[in-house]
Amino acid sequence: MDASQWDRLRDWAVFLGLLLVACVVLFTANRPFNQALRTYGMEVTARIEQQFAWVGRYTRALQENEALRARNIELSSEVARSRDARSRNQELEAMLALQTRADTTVADSVLVAARILQKDLTQQQNLLTLDVGQRDGIETGMPVVTPNGIVGTVLMVSPRFCRVLPFLNTDFRVPGTIETVGAEGVVRWEGNALNQLAMEHVVKTEPVEEGQRVSTSSHSSVFPSGWPIGTIDSVDTRPGRNDLTITLRPAVALHTLDHAFVMRTQSNDYDLAADSTQGYDYATMNPGDS
């Protein structure tokens, strides 16, 4: 057979050989030898798969970890929203209950609910802006309070808004009384920490201690008596002085405050020099800014 003949028959020969092998494998599939061969092949491949099975587990663990991290973030966000909603709900419930308290504390008083639109708590002349004004019956000098304590006094009023001088202002003054001992003094902010007030003019002989509450005095011409100002944080004496150095923790945290009440009374004779805004420069305040 020459080369040209072999070239013509080669493809058929290969096809017949493969067909023969396929037939042999088909008809001997259940033979013991073939079964043993398949079993050995399964053993070899299983061992290889066993060695590299950690790759799949590691990949699945990464995917599960990523899913758990995303779920944890989602749950944390839901918890934060729930806590914020609960806190706001408690604040609003306390504000609703405050109307009864005001009716029993101040005769002919009306509480006007207000939302705090702006807080400027970055300097010594801090201010707040509320969304109530002249059309709501708000006037200069009215007290601003919350269920937890005093906030400040109305400084300026426009038809729809008002500017409030908060207790975190170096021009703010309010007469205070230490409830358990009846000692009186003046509470002010020294312009340092936002969580610290100073109480002055309390003589050394008074039994003042940490933890005692300080509320507004009956000598205040703005705030009704008995409204919380803060709690005594420290008491100290200064050499050569007859009064105590007292620091208070404010009853109200202004940086987290969102709502407040303006206390409107039928008689609101406000004495600028007697209470909280003595020495304040009104020229720096433009009513149009409200």
Image (cartoon, helix red, strand yellow):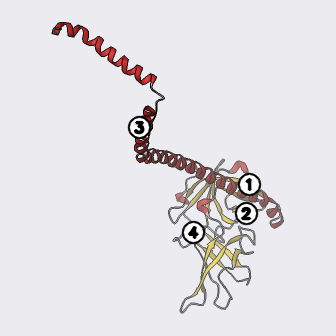
Please tell me the numbered disc located at residue 41: 3
Distance from disc 2 to disc 3, alpha carbons, whole Å, reads 81 Å
Q: Secondary structure at mark 3?
A: helix
At label 2, the amino acid type is Pro
Say which residue appears at 69% left-offset and 53% top-offset.
Answer: 114
**Mark 1 or mark 3, which has the lower sequence index?**
3
Distance from disc 1 to disc 3, alpha carbons, whole Å, reads 86 Å
The reply to whether callout 2 and callout 4 are in contact (CB within 8 Å) is: no
Q: Position of residue 247 (x, y in %)?
A: 59, 78
Q: Mark 2 against mark 3, which lies toward the viewer?
A: 3
Distance from disc 1 to disc 4, alpha carbons, whole Å, reads 25 Å
Q: Mark 1 against mark 2, which lies toward the viewer?
A: 2
Q: Of residues 64 and 45, which is closer to you in this image?
A: 45
Say which residue appears at 29% left-offset and 13% top-offset.
Answer: 13
Q: Mark 2 against mark 4, which lies toward the viewer?
A: 2
Please tell me the numbered disc located at residue 112: 1
**Mark 2 or mark 4, which has the lower sequence index?**
2
**Mark 2 or mark 3, which has the lower sequence index?**
3
Outermost residue to the left: 2
The reply to whether callout 1 and callout 2 are in contact (CB within 8 Å) is: no
Please tell me the numbered disc located at residue 193: none
Q: Is residue 114 left or right of residue 237?
A: right
- Looking at the rendering, in which quadrant would you find the N terminus? top left
Callout 1: few (<14), some (14-19), or many (20+) C-alpha neighbours within 10 Å?
some
Please tell me the numbered disc located at residue 171: 4
**Mark 3 or mark 4, which has the lower sequence index?**
3
The residue to which callout 2 is attached is 147
Callout 2: few (<14), some (14-19), or many (20+) C-alpha neighbours within 10 Å?
many
